[in-house]
Amino acid sequence: MSWNTFKEKCVRFADSSWTRRIGLSLIYIIMILIPAYHTIRHQVPPDAELRKTEGELIFRHVPKEGSLTGIKTVDGEFLFTCKDYYSGKNYCLADNKLEPVIQGKQATVLWYRQPAYLWMDRNRLVELRVGNDTIVSRAQTERWINVSKRVMWWEAVIGFVLFVALDVYAARYFKRRGKT
């Protein structure tokens, strides 16, 4: 099949209003609704269900993820995120000047496996303690989660409006194109 034939078939597929709407609906569900679902129903589990890891505190920069907080133990490195959904923030420290001061010290992390997107899970940091100091508290983590829930609600609404506008624009474009 040549490039022009492929392009022609794509235009014919997009020209059909029902296929365009199904395609846009699938994109909306995959890009907006699934992450919104995971974010809006996200809650920190009770203390009894949290995992506890102790070791040397590290910070790692991971491509496509950014800076992650981690614990180095005899079993290896455990990296943690503070993301609530696939486009949230990874960095757990409120003050990045604190990182060089606490890196390499003995720390305790309370965490759990957080569903992030369909079949993806990530290690979600709940509480970080270095010595007797609590660097990230459970209350702070719960506040971040609540802010993310409000933000994601608006992202879902705005995303819906944008997808409807895109459908209207595409319908007008193909209707105009058909007249020439």
Image (cartoon, rainbow, N blue to C red):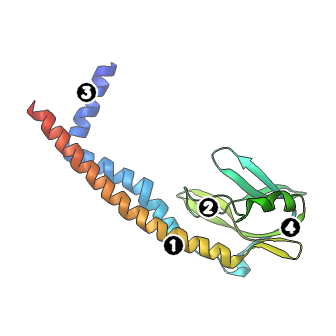
Q: Earlier in the sequence, mark 1 or mark 2?
A: 1
On the picture, is 6 further left or further right than 122? left
Q: Which mark is residue 137?
A: none
Q: Which mark is residue 41?
A: 1
Q: CA distance from mark 2 to mark 3?
A: 42 Å
The quarter of the picture where the C terminus appears is: top left
Front residue of 24/159: it is 159
Please identify the residue farthest to the top as the structure is shown. Answer: 2
Residue at position x 32%, y 49% in the image = 24
Give the structural element (helix, strand or loop) at label 1. loop
Q: Quadrant of residue 90?
A: bottom right
* x, y percent for residue 88: 57, 59
Q: CA distance from mark 3 to mark 1?
A: 43 Å
| Earlier residue among tags 3 and 1 | 3
Q: At numbered mark 3, what does the secondary structure look like: helix, strand or loop?
A: helix
Task: Return the residue at label 2.
Answer: 83
Q: Report the residue marked by disc 3.
A: 8
